[in-house]
Amino acid sequence: MELWYSENHTKNVRLSVKINRHIHSGKSDFQRIDILESLEFGRVLTLDGLIMLTERDEFVYHEMMAHVPLAVNPKIETVLVIGGGDGGAVRELAKYPGIARIDLVEIDKMVVEVCKEFLPALSCAFSDSRIEVHYQDGLKFIRHHQNEYDLIIVDSTDPFGPGEGLFTKEFYGNCYNALKERGIMICQMESPFYKSYSAEMARVQKKVSSIFPVARAYQAHIPTYPCGHWLFGFASKGLCPLEDLDESWKGLSIAAKYYNLPLHRGAFALPTYILEALKNA
Ligand code: SAM
């Protein structure tokens, strides 16, 4: 008997992945948490039935969240990650010896515990002494921090359920206040192709660009995400992702399977239909 996991990307489009084992299923106060073993993508983390990451393609997402800002400001010392309880983003950040402190604010302790148990390749950096995990709502946490961080990465679920508040103007405004003068905020902006996702992408762009002087989108290709094409937001108080790209990043010899400096430049070269959607946001 064949076992398949299916996720509806729209009401007419579905991604199905062949599964050989349903390894874990649990329910926290916030969401359902499952770990599946797939033939093509290795282990898969789903929250409320939606793919968050797979062992095989998570490196794309986490590298693009961490290395893009670090290549613009290699002197980043203090970082806040909101969400990211799987550990992928902090694993990439921990590769930088210049980073002194990483606060990870994850609302759901069970996500961290499950990823520590079943996804060691992602959660391996939690033992790094620079990382402090706060089990709180990021929307509340950010209200009490001003002028404190060089980088904020918003690695949240989608804009419904516990993640909804992390897509609001209030939240982005508080991120602005929590950043230092050369601060950078990275957030995920959903997918540009399907209507429901691209509407959210435009809403994020509109809110972020009304608060940050620099608000640019960049792209990556993640096979298990809706249409395989994903957008991220780069926002700052002044630093530009291309003009201020610091080629000395190469000298850090950071291990990366997806990110490199030419790709960084290419990631900001968006298709015309996306530029139009962002401009009309
Ligand atoms: N890093 C993964 C990826 O590759 O796409 C997905 C994101 S990570 C699993 C999303 C995390 O955000 C979840 O663990 C979820 O519990 C957390 N989260 C959602 N809403 C939150 C909130 N308001 N404050 C803090 N964490 C939140």
Image (spheres, rainbow, N blue to C red):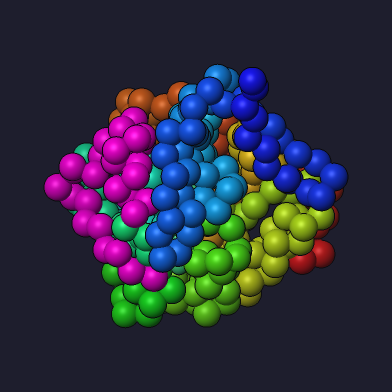
- For the magenta stretch, what is the residue range? 110-137
Please say whether residue 115 is one of the residues in the magenta stretch: yes
Residue 58 at least partly seen? no
Q: Where does residue 247 sit, x and y in percent of width and height?
A: 43, 34
Q: In this view, does 82 lie above or below 211?
A: above
The answer to whether residue 200 is visible is yes
> Closest to the observer: 219 or 147?
219
Q: Quadrant of residue 123?
A: top left
Outermost residue to the left: 129
Give left or right: position of 250 versus 196: left
Name which residue lies at 38% across and 45% down. 86
Residue 30 pos. (x, y %): 45, 64
In this rendering, position of residue 10 left or right of residue 67: right
For ligand 1, the image quadrant comes to bottom left
| Residue furthest out toward the front | 1
Q: Is residue 179 left or right of residue 32?
A: left
* In front of the other: 125 or 11: 11
